[in-house]
């Protein structure tokens, strides 16, 4: 277990890593590590059994475009993302009301394109 944790710490310190697939428990505390590669664009977690809400950490990844929280990656009770602006009502060219979202307020997930839970 200690050898695996050492390997994980080394891996998470890789500055040029863009995609990461982690399967299995991450640590004894069942929480997400504090350090991740800064250039990470895709993260997949499977059976990591994280009990603590991972969103406060994950939503700060500046380049994350794809996040996949797969089977048993999160076993906690509640996940909370940063506040998003309320939907705005607009009228399209055909006179129909459409709902859209305002500009990003600069909080969580600045580049996220795909989220799979």
Image (cartoon, rainbow, N blue to C red):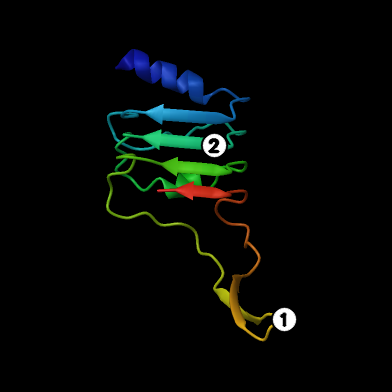
Binning the other alpha carbons within 10 Å of mark 1 as few (below 14), some (14 to 19) or many (20 upward) gives: few
- Residue at 37% from the left image edge and 54% from the top image edge: 79
Quarter of the image where one finds residue 96: bottom right
Query: Viewer-nearest of labels 2 and 1?
Result: 1
Left or right position of 113 against 94? left
Binning the other alpha carbons within 10 Å of mark 2 as few (below 14), some (14 to 19) or many (20 upward) gives: some
User: In what quadrant of the picture does the N terminus appear?
Assistant: top left
- Identify residue for label 2: 42
- Residue at 36% from the left image edge and 17% from the top image edge: 4
- Identify residue for label 1: 93
Question: Element at badge 2?
Answer: strand
Left or right position of 25 against 57? left
Question: Element at badge 1?
Answer: loop
Above or below, 1 relative to 89:
above
x then y, percent, for residue 78: 32, 55
x then y, percent, for residue 54: 40, 45
Above or below, 91 relative to 7:
below
Quarter of the image where one finds residue 33: top left
Dot 2 or dot 1: first in sequence order is 2
x then y, percent, for residue 45: 40, 35
Above or below, 55 relative to 103:
above
Along the line of sight, which residue is nearer the eye, 37 or 97?
97
Disc ID at residue 62: none
Left or right position of 59 against 75? right
Quarter of the image where one finds residue 6: top left
């Amino acid at each position: 277990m200690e050898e695996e944790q050492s390997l994980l710490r080394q891996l998470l310190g890789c500055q040029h890593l863009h995609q990461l697939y982690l399967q299995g428990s991450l640590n004894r505390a069942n929480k997400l590590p504090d350090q991740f590669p800064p250039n990470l664009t895709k993260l997949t977690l499977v059976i990591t059994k994280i009990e603590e809400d991972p969103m406060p950490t994950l939503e700060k990844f500046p380049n994350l475009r794809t996040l996949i929280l797969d089977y048993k990656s999160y076993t906690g009770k509640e996940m909370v993302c940063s506040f998003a602006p309320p939907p705005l009502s607009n009228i399209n060219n055909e006179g129909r009301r459409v709902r859209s979202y305002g500009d990003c307020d600069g909080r969580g997930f600045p580049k996220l394109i795909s989220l799979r839970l």
